[in-house]
Amino acid sequence: MGKFIKSTGEKIKYRLCNSPIGMSMKTYLKIMFNSEGASPSEVMERLQSLGFRPITGAYDMVYEWDNGATVKDAIWFADKVHETLKGFKVLFELETISE
């Protein structure tokens, strides 16, 4: 199971565990909005443009990887999410798991 957490605030946290290569992976995203930042609909729209889809439950969105994705791919994608949300004044948490 791989786990990766990154936030757009001043402190950036990473937690990453080795993940079996070649297994199906999903990246779950939890978002914390700020009343002084972008609207939730704008944030969700930007994330959907990356391939996330909204879900209900403990997480707000999920990205389903093609088979063969690696931990390195998940780190690259986390950087892409960070870049996409820069300036939106939101915090986010990513968790990538192998199935």
Image (cartoon, rainbow, N blue to C red):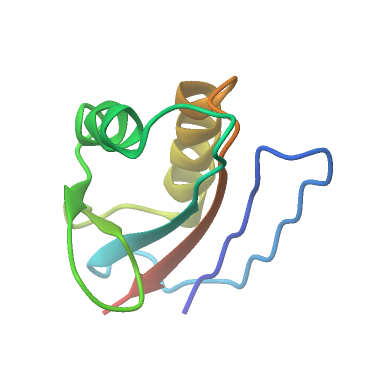
Q: Residue at x 57, y 71 (%)?
A: 18
Task: Please provide percent x and percent y for residue 61.
Answer: 27, 56
Q: Residue at x 42, y 65 (%)?
A: 96
- Quadrant into which the C terminus falls: bottom left
Q: Nearer the viewer, residue 47 or 37?
A: 37
Q: Nearer the viewer, residue 55 or 5?
A: 55
Q: Please indicate whether residue 59 sits to the left or right of residue 30 in the image.
A: left
Q: Residue at x 65, y 46 (%)?
A: 7
Vertical order, 62 against 97 (above or below) = above
Q: Please indicate whether residue 81 sits to the left or right of residue 69 in the image.
A: right
Vertical order, 19 against 43 (above or below) = below
Vertical order, 4 against 84 (above or below) = below
Task: Please provide percent x and percent y for residue 19.
Answer: 48, 71
When asked about the image quadrant of residue 59, the answer is: bottom left
Q: Please indicate whether residue 94 sits to the left or right of residue 6 in the image.
A: left
Q: Nearer the viewer, residue 67 or 60?
A: 60
Q: Residue at x 22, y 67 (%)?
A: 24
Q: Please indicate whether residue 9 sits to the left or right of residue 4 in the image.
A: right
Task: Please provide percent x and percent y for residue 5.
Answer: 61, 58
When asked about the image quadrant of residue 45, the answer is: top left
